[in-house]
Image (cartoon, rainbow, N blue to C red):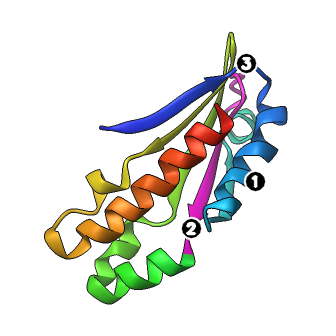
């Protein structure tokens, strides 16, 4: 799977606000948040390093994509993953062009790809 990612030499708690700001600058809002580490701790008693999934959505792009193919809703929202590493925080997102196949969605996929690549560059 093709992803865009970077590792920032700061703790997840310090990187997350920058990720949210970079997403907002590109028209994405965060609709969902999953604290995987906290969930695993609560449900299974498992300790792990911090891992958060932010479900990001750009309403304009989503609206246009849904007009073309309502099944796009199966791929929403876009997951932005923040994971603590020994050297900082890795931020990853899958390339939307890989998920939105077909010529009718190519332009929207390219737009989403460019925006998410910019988010990664901004926080790097």
Residue 43 quadrant = top right
Q: Is residue 77 magenta?
A: no
* Within-10-Å neighbours for mark 2: few <14, some 14–19, many 20+: many
- Which region shows up in magenta? 44-58
Q: CA distance from mark 2 to mark 1?
A: 13 Å
Asked if residue 17 can be seen in this view, the reply is yes
Which residue is at a point 80% across and 24% down the rendered structure image?
11
Q: Where is residue 47 shown, x and y percent of the image?
A: 72, 22
Q: Secondary structure at mark 2?
A: strand
- Relative to the observer, which residue lies in front, 65 or 83? 65
Which residue is at a point 78% across and 22% down the rendered structure image?
10
Q: Secondary structure at mark 1?
A: helix
Residue designated by label 3: 9
Task: Check residue 43 in the rendering and tell me which mark sits there, or answer none.
Answer: none
In this image, 33 relative to 78: left or right? right
Residue designated by label 1: 21
Which residue is at a point 40% across and 38% down the rendered structure image?
3
Which residue is at a point 27% across and 85% down the rendered structure image?
68
Return the residue found at the far left: 103
Above or below, comparing residue 9 to residue 77 in the picture: above
Quadrant into which the N terminus falls:
top left
Q: Given this view, does label 3 or label 2 mark the residue nearer the observer?
A: 3
Q: Are marks 2 and 1 in contact (CB under 8 Å)?
A: no
Q: Where is residue 27 shown, x and y percent of the image?
A: 62, 68
Return the residue found at the far top: 86
Residue designated by label 2: 57
Q: CA distance from mark 3 to mark 1?
A: 18 Å
Asked if residue 32 can be seen in this view, the reply is no
């Amino acid at each position: 799977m093709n992803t865009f990612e970077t590792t920032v030499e700061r703790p997840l708690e310090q990187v997350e606000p920058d990720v949210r700001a970079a997403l907002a600058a590109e028209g994405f809002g965060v609709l969902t948040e999953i604290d995987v580490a906290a969930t695993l701790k609560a449900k299974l008693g498992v300790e792990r390093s911090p891992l958060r999934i932010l479900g990001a959505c750009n309403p304009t792009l989503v609206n246009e994509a849904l007009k073309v193919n309502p099944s796009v809703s199966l791929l929403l929202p876009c997951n932005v993953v923040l994971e603590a590493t020994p050297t900082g925080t890795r931020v990853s997102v899958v390339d939307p062009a890989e998920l939105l196949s077909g010529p009718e969605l190519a332009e929207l996929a390219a737009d989403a790809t460019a925006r998410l690549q910019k988010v990664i560059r901004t926080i790097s």
